[in-house]
Amino acid sequence: MREYHGGIWAPPGFYLERTIWKTQAVPRGGQILEGAEESTYVRLPIPPLLMAFLIPIAGALYVILLPLIAGALIIWLAGSKAWKAAVLVANRRLLRGRSRDHSSLGR
C-alpha cells in the first residue's frame, strides 16, 4: 500500500491516518489531505459503495461488543483486587505466626 502525507494532494478514495486512526474520504477529483507533513495516511483498498455498508456494521459491532468488553474488564478488575487482598491477608497471617515463634525462642 502506498503512503501519503498530510498537506499533499491525494487521488479519490478512503484514507486512514495511522497514528490517530482517523479516516478521511477524498471525493472525486482528489483533494489535499488534512494534517501536517508528519501525518502518514494509507489509502484503504475499499470501494466507496462497500464502505457505505461496512460503516454501519462496524458501528453495530461497537455498540454490541462494548458492554461485553466492559463487563469482562470489570470482572477481571474485581478478581485481581480480590486476589491481591487474599494474598495480603495470607502474608499477614504468616508473618504473625513467625513473629510469635521467634518471640518464644528468646525467653
Image (spheres, rainbow, N blue to C red):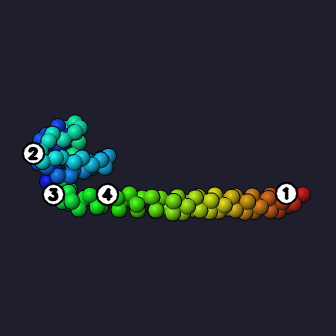
Q: Earlier in the sequence, mark 2 or mark 3?
A: 3
Q: Residue at x 16, y 47 (%)?
A: 27
Q: Are marks 1 and 3 in contact (CB under 8 Å)?
A: no
For image coordinates 35% across by 62% down, the residue present is 57
Eyeballing the image, is 61 above or below 28? below
91 on left or right of 23: right
- Please identify the quarter of the rendering in which residue 93 is found: bottom right
- Precedes in sequence: disc 1 or disc 3: 3
Q: Looking at the picture, tell me which residue is in the foreground, 60 or 77.
A: 60
Q: Residues within 10 Å of mark 1 (few under 14, many from 20)?
A: few
- Residue at coordinates 72% horizontally, 63% vertically from top-left? 90
- First in sequence: mark 3 or mark 4? 3
Q: Is residue 13 left or right of residue 70?
A: left
Callout 3, which amino acid?
Answer: Met
Q: Name the residue tied to disc 1.
A: 103
The Cα–Cα distance between marks 3 and 4, rounded to whole angstroms, is: 21 Å
The residue tagged 3 is: 1
Mark in the foreground, 1 or 3: 3
In the image, residue 76 above or below residue 22: below
Q: Quadrant of the C terminus?
A: bottom right
The residue at the far right in this view is: 107
Distance Cα–Cα, label 1 vs label 3: 72 Å
Element under disc 4: helix
Image location (x, y in percent) of residue 81:
63, 58
Image position of 65 (left or right of 53)? right
Q: Earlier in the sequence, mark 2 or mark 1?
A: 2
Q: Which disc, if any, is residue 55? A: 4
Q: Which residue is mark 2?
A: 29
